[in-house]
Image (tube, rainbow, N blue to C red):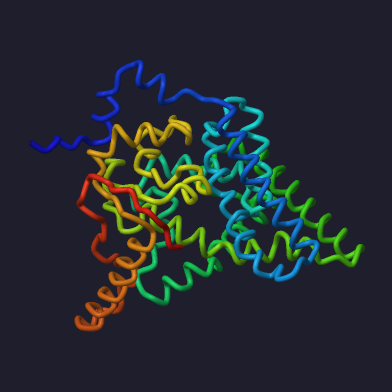
Amino acid sequence: MSQEQLDHRSLLRSLSNEQRKILTGKSNWPGLANLALHWGLILLLGGLIALRIPYWPMLLVPQGILIIFLFTLLHETVHRTAFKTLRVNKAVAWVCGFLIILPPGWFRCFHFEHHRHTQDPERDPELARPKPDSLWRYAVHLSGLPVWCSHLRTLVRNALGRCDDVFVPKERLGKLRREARTMLVLYVSLLAASVAAGSAVLLYVWLLPLLIGQPFLRLYLLAEHGRCPEVANMLANSRTLCTNRVVRTLAWNMPYHAEHHSYPAVPYHRLPDFHALTRGHLQVTEPGYLSFHGKYVVSCIRSRREADQSGSNTDQTQRPPSISSSTPVIMEASSEAR
């Protein structure tokens, strides 16, 4: 007899107090070890690029992926669960936000609103811009150009004190203004120092890899909620992807995304344990990112053909049918294509 599937609220109610205590237990050590690995690799590759070793341009892609995936560390630190110590979470969040040009304080407000209203088309800020529903829009989305424009616009607007986002409490506007101004001053200072020194090292070690890496993050993030049902159940409106250890480590276990949305208080290093409890109740899963994007591209093509056949090209915001898998049990993939 198959196991009855629970929604995320029923699943959380089924947990014992002991299970909750274990799952939400924070620790500095797993996070510090992962931080040392992540930042260490960035410094290593950055040093090799700066030294212009033979074939150094080949390092720009892995360097870019490592830097842009600091977003997943920023995500974990704004939840204050990457580390047990609050000050460490805040400090790491600030460094990550600075490196990927995303104000961490503002992102915390944005992201918590996303958690409160996940997949609600009226209130989820991630749905303010429709997901790509054609091959052209899919390509533009993956380019990263829209998100870079959005990040820069947010940074400048916040610095000018013109933030009017509904999810930002009024009492935090002053702090966000100071945050944005500090970031801009540091960016200008680094630019001025580079020009004065006649050095392009920051361009090749940081900025160019950042641009190169952004499409990889777009591929990753689109799979979290793309084409998921617009329902309140976190085990249905978020997708868990089965992938290999390298990707899970790089993304700080965020491929366990339905688990994260169901119980955000669970630190990243406890998500595999929570996955063991939720796997029978997951409603939207995928065996890997290649599988997801293959289906996504097909859905875009099908949507375009249907629109052409019906002659209805006026509704540019219509979403194609869900491409989610109905199989609740996830089988571990042996490799990952990105």
Using the image as rendered, state which of residue 17 and residue 110 is in the foreground: 17
In the image, 76 versus 35, the foreground residue is: 35
Total marks drawn? 0
Residue at figure coordinates x 75%, y 53% from the top left: 184
Query: Where 232 sits versus 306, above or below?
Result: above
- The answer to whether 139 appears left or right of 95 in the picture is left
Q: Residue at x 71, y 68 (%)?
A: 56
Residue at the image point whose x is 19% and y is 81% from the top: 310
- 63 over 33 or under it: above or below: below
Q: Quadrant of residue 30?
A: top right
- Which quadrant holds the N terminus? top left
Q: In which image quadrant can residue 132 be found?
A: bottom left
Depth check: 264 or 149 in front? 264
Outermost residue on the left side: it is 1
Q: From the viewer's perspective, tell me whether residue 44 is left or right of residue 25.
A: right
Query: Residue 119 placed where, x, y %?
Result: 34, 49
13 vs 267, nearest the viewer: 267
Q: Percent x, y for residue 78? A: 55, 38
Furthest-right residue in this view: 196
Q: Position of residue 265 (x, y in %)?
A: 44, 30
Q: Quadrant of residue 45?
A: bottom right
Judged from this view, the residue extending furthest toward the top is 17
Apparent side of residue 322 relative to residue 169 in the rendered image (left or right): left
Q: Position of residue 328 (x, y in %)?
A: 22, 45
